[in-house]
Image (spheres, rainbow, N blue to C red):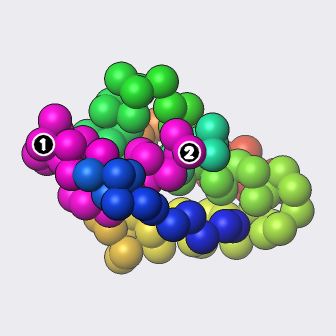
Amino acid sequence: MKVISFSAEELFIIGMLQIEKPALSQQDCSAILSAQKVNGKLVTSDGNLRKFAGTKDISVRGHLWVFDLMVKEGVITGTIAIEKLNYLREVINPWLALPKNECDIRIDMWKET
């Protein structure tokens, strides 16, 4: 991870992004600009942010991608991934609306790891 600072001009751009898409917070807009600055991916499962980032040609990944990567790289086991995904969906943010079918596919797959 890297901390990214913004110039006064970039803070203005963040403000303009917010005007362009009022549903997004200042933090959302700063994430857009950060991804653009480093030519990076944006990690979010927020639908509004995801769609807007797409209009700016920013590659977007979601929570499930992060879980997939952690299991693949052996950072966490499938069992822990299942536990944490369920906790995310049921306790941390039940309104996240991760696609149930995709979650179920991963849970079945992770049971075997």
Whether residue 79 appears in this view of the structure is no
Up-down: is 34 above or below 8? Answer: above
Residue type, numbered disc 2: Lys
Task: Give the prevailing secondary structure in the magenta stretch.
Answer: helix
Q: Check disc 1 and give the amino acid type.
A: Ile
Report x, y in % for residue 73: 87, 56
Name the residue rendered at 83%, 68% in the picture: 75
Q: Position of residue 22 (x, y in %)?
A: 11, 45
**Element type where label 1 sits in the image:** helix
Instruction: Decide: few, some or many residues near mark 2? Use Cα within 10 Å; few <14, some 14-19, many ≥20.
Output: few
Q: Is residue 82 above or below residue 20?
A: below
Give whichever of 53, 3 is nearer the camera.
3
N-term-proximal mark, 2 vs 1: 1
The answer for how far apart the CA atoms under marks 2 and 1 are is 20 Å
Figure quadrant of the C terminus: bottom right
For mark 1, does the 10 Å Cα neighbourhood hold few (<14), some (14 to 19), or many (20 or more) residues? few
Front residue of 43 and 4: 4
Residue visible at 43% across and 54% down in the picture: 31
Q: Is residue 50 above or below residue 23?
A: above
Which residue matches tag 2?
Answer: 37
Asked where in the image residue 50 lies, by quadrant, the reply is: top left
Report the front residue among 15 and 54: 15
The quadrant of the image that shows the N terminus is bottom right
Secondary structure under tag 2 reads helix
From the viewer's perspective, tell me whether residue 77 is left or right of residue 67: right
Where is residue 47, by image quadrant?
Answer: top left
Residue under numbered circle 1: 19
Task: Provide the residue span drawn in magenta.
Answer: 13-37
